[in-house]
Amino acid sequence: MNHSVIIPEFIPYEKIRSFIPEVVKIQKGDNVKWINVSKDFHDLYFFGLSSELSKVEIIEQLQIGPGESKELTFNYDYSQIDYICKEHTTMKDMKEHNSISIFVQKYSDMSNTERLICLSKRVNIRHQYLSSQLDRRE
């Protein structure tokens, strides 16, 4: 499946401070295309995060010029890949990173409990109580 991310023009004091969307939910093997509509070059660095979040490595680098678009295929075993723009990480008002969440099974086929368990690994929440509540609703 193909996904797209827009790199907007970052204007000081405007509301847009990150790529659109900030988080892309994909399955392993999906393609993501970045479309740069800004006047700036963007050097993107992609970091693979291990499931226990203890190991991080740079897995891809992508340079996109003004008006260009570039695509990557994600065949990695990471459940989450964060990425930053080297040039824009020092801007005070820009979001520090964006993220690609890679799901083993199709997100729309997952139950709420499966989604919660998967996402709880990416953010620091305890899912035991929440998942027991969700199990009653499904």
Image (tube, rainbow, N blue to C red):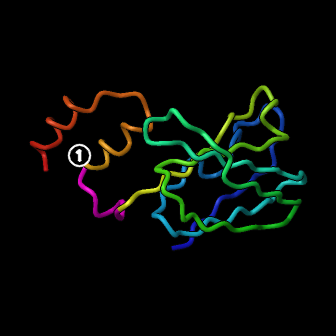
Residue assigned mark 1: 113
Residue situated in front as seen by the camera: 43 or 59 = 59
Locate residue 15 relative to residue 119 in the image: left or right. right
Measuring 78% from the left and 26% from the top, which residue is drawn there?
A: 92
Question: At which x and y percent is residue 124?
Answer: 41, 28
Secondary element under disc 1, as helix, strand or loop, is helix
Picture mark count: 1
Locate residue 121 relative to residue 117 in the image: left or right. right
Locate residue 74 relative to residue 95 in the image: left or right. left
Seen in the picture, residue 65 relative to 116 is either above or below; the reply is below
Name, please, the residue furthest toward the bottom: 1
Residue situated in front as seen by the camera: 127 or 18 = 127
Amino acid carrying label 1: it is: Thr
Seen in the picture, residue 81 relative to 30 is either above or below; the reply is above
Question: At which x and y percent is residue 38?
Answer: 84, 54
Magenta stretch contains residue 53 = no
Locate residue 95 relative to residue 3 in the image: left or right. right
Measuring 56% from the left and 72% from the top, which residue is drawn there?
A: 2
Measuring 66% from the left and 39% from the top, which residue is drawn there?
A: 97
Question: At which x and y percent is residue 28?
Answer: 48, 64
Q: Residues within 10 Å of mark 1 (few under 14, many from 20)?
A: some
Measuring 83% from the left and 66% from the top, which residue is drawn there?
A: 68
Name, please, the residue furthest toward the left: 136
Question: At which x and y percent is residue 82?
Answer: 60, 44
Which of the 4 image quarters holds residue 130? Answer: top left
User: Where are the magenta residues, as a range?
Assistant: 105-112
